[in-house]
Image: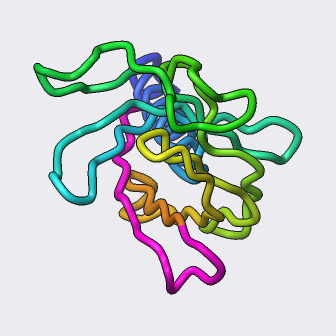
């Protein structure tokens, strides 16, 4: 076998491994997501979702405030330990567990109103989108945001 053939095979194998790693990374909710406001259609925040011990949590890393809005707001409507804490750095998704392409059993905090809702997340578009639903009681009564994968 010539060095050229061997180099070509190695390049093809390396590309296949890299593509597999990339596809694997897209098969989980873990990563950085841009939330899109369901009423304005504009980006509102970057949320990093991480898995720890089978539980997925999401922390706000960055906000996209309008020009007249406070760039470092506090959660004035939150209760308990979140009251008046900075929204940037706040864990808003808690307790989610993987169930196929869905993530269930957790909650999501809406820092705008301080309310905590039951939540369900579902991967879509080959892991490039995450449909995040917050609801009261049953999933039928709630609202959904689409989050776009950043990395």
Task: Tell which of 142 and 115 is nearer to you.
Answer: 115
Please provide the residue range marked out in magenta.
135-151
Q: Quadrant of residue 4?
A: top left
**Residue at x 77% of width, y 50% of height:** 95
- Residue 78 shown left or right of residue 132 in the figure: right
**Residue at x 59% of width, y 37% of height:** 78
Furthest residue in direction left, as rendered: 67
What colour scheme has been applied to the protein in the rendered image?
rainbow
Residue 143 picture location, percent across and down: 41, 70
- Residue 38 shown left or right of residue 18 in the figure: left
The relative height of residue 75 versus residue 33 in the rendered view (above or below) is above
- Residue 42 shown left or right of residue 53 in the figure: left
Residue 151 picture location, percent across and down: 42, 31
**Residue at x 53% of width, y 35% of height:** 31
Residue 23 picture location, percent across and down: 50, 47
The relative height of residue 88 versus residue 115 in the rendered view (above or below) is above
Tally the numbered discs.
Answer: 0
Task: Tell which of 79 and 11 is nearer to you.
Answer: 79
Residue 10 picture location, percent across and down: 51, 27
**Residue at x 51% of width, y 29% of height:** 75
Q: Quadrant of residue 12?
A: top left
The relative height of residue 31 versus residue 55 in the rendered view (above or below) is above
Is residue 90 located in the magenta-colored stretch of the structure?
Answer: no
- Residue 112 shown left or right of residue 90 in the figure: left
């Amino acid at each position: 076998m010539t060095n050229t053939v061997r180099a070509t095979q190695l390049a093809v194998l390396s590309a296949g491994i890299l593509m597999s790693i990339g596809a694997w990374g897209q098969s989980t909710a873990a990563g950085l997501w841009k939330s899109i406001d369901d009423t304005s259609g504009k980006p509102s925040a970057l949320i990093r979702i991480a898995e720890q011990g089978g539980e997925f949590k999401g922390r706000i890393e960055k906000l996209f405030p309008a020009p007249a809005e406070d760039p470092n707001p506090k959660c004035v409507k939150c209760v308990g330990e979140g009251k008046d804490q900075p929204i940037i750095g706040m864990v808003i998704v808690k307790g989610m567990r993987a169930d196929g392409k869905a993530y269930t059993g957790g909650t999501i905090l809406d820092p705008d109103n301080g309310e905590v809702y039951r939540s369900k997340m579902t991967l879509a578009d080959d892991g490039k989108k995450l449909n995040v639903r917050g609801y009261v009681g049953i999933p039928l009564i709630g609202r959904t945001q689409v989050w776009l994968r950043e990395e």
